[in-house]
Image (spheres, rainbow, N blue to C red):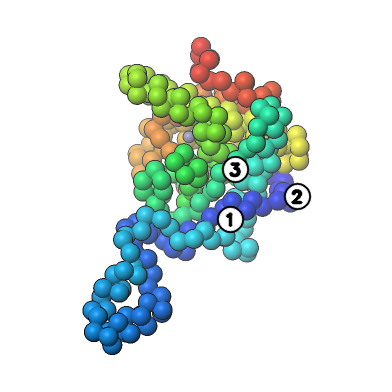
Amino acid sequence: MRLDDSRESDNVEDRRASGPRIGGRGTIGIGTIVLALVAMYFGVDPSVVLQMAEGPPTTQDAPATKPPANDPQARFVSKVLGETEDTWSAIFQKDLNRQYVAPKLVLFRGATPTACGTGQSAMGPFYCPGDSKVYIDLAFFDELQNRFKAPGDFAQAYVIAHEVGHHVQHLLGISDQVDQLRRRNPSQANALSVRMELQADCLAGLWAQRANAARNILEGGDIEEALGAATAIGDDRLQKQAQGYAVPDSFTHGSSAQRVRWFKRGLEGGGLKQCDTFAASTL
Ligand SMILES: [Zn+2]
């Protein structure tokens, strides 16, 4: 990929330094300790002051932290996210006459709290509609390269673009509609999930086509890298492997061939209509 001219997004939140924080408690500042000492002096049990300062177990993480400027992997992710912001803003403006609201992207290690419950690295990258955030443990990109044999920067960009595709589905109300349909027709739940996932692949393809048309970001071999990733992380391929790593964000993504087909469909350009997997008679 050519990202030299691409801007970095401001929407990357770096939680890697904080590590797993699930059920953790707030930090105790020096002020609290002073307060506890003062309380002790006045005959108040200091543990009461400390407990009040700590508060209940946190489900919220520390305030958003920007990734360090000298971290090439984080910079890459920020640039790809910036590309999705510019591209989807233009598509929303032009095709839908509405404003695109960008998602946040959280880098984490191990586990992290989300509005959708505890996010675990083993789940692979995922999107949580409850807080409109994409969650990625960058170790997944090593997995993609070493375990799934899908190397390359554009393979990684495709993974990010797929998750941003879920955000687009959320903004367009598609996720909500599908959730309702799933509840009404439990027997169709899996088939509906597959259509959701293939649509996210198609939206990733559409992003790649539009971003390339605007800023010429693709290099020779990039598309093959993304197709390699789509092939490697299709359900059929994954189920053949001994499970150690769960399928990214759910177990129902469609077969490798289907994922490749819908990514390519998006790449052909056109518009959002082209990615209507729900209207397609065959996937
Ligand atoms: Zn997905």
Q: Distance between the residues labelled 3 and 2?
A: 20 Å
Mark whose residue sits in front, 3 or 2: 3
| Whole-percent x, y for residue 74 in the image | 58, 55
User: Which amino acid type is shown beneath numbered disc 3?
Assistant: Ala
- Total tally of numbered discs in the picture: 3
**Residue 52 in sight from this viewpoint:** yes
Quarter of image, res 237: top left
Q: Determine which residue is flagged by label 3.
A: 102
Q: Callout 2: few (<14), some (14-19), or many (20+) C-alpha neighbours within 10 Å?
A: few
Looking at numbered disc 2 in the image, what kind of residue is underneath it?
Answer: Asp
Give, as a three-letter code, the residue at label 1: Ala
Q: Which of 203 and 88 is in front in this view?
A: 88
Q: In this view, does 100 lie above or below 39?
A: above
Determine the residue positioned at 69% across, 26% down. 95
Q: Which residue is denoted by mark 1 in the rendering? A: 74
The residue positioned 74% from the left and 51% from the top of the image is: 4
SS for callout 1: helix
Element on which disc 3 rests: loop
Mark 2: which secondary structure?
Answer: loop
Mark 2 C-beta to ligand 1 under 8 Å: no
Q: Mark 2 points at which residue?
A: 5
Q: Are marks 3 and 2 in contact (CB under 8 Å)?
A: no
1 and 3 marks in contact (CB < 8 Å): no
Tell me the residue at 37%/66% (across/down): 26
Task: Locate residue 57 relative to residue 268 in the image: left or right.
Answer: left
Which residue in the rendered view is the most extreme toward the top? 281
Other residues around mark 3 within 10 Å, as few (<14) / some (14–19) / many (≥20): many
Q: Which numbered disc flags the more N-terminal residue, 3 or 2?
A: 2
For the residues marked 2 and 1, what is the alpha-carbon distance in whole angstroms? 16 Å
Mark 2 or mark 1: which comes first in sequence? 2
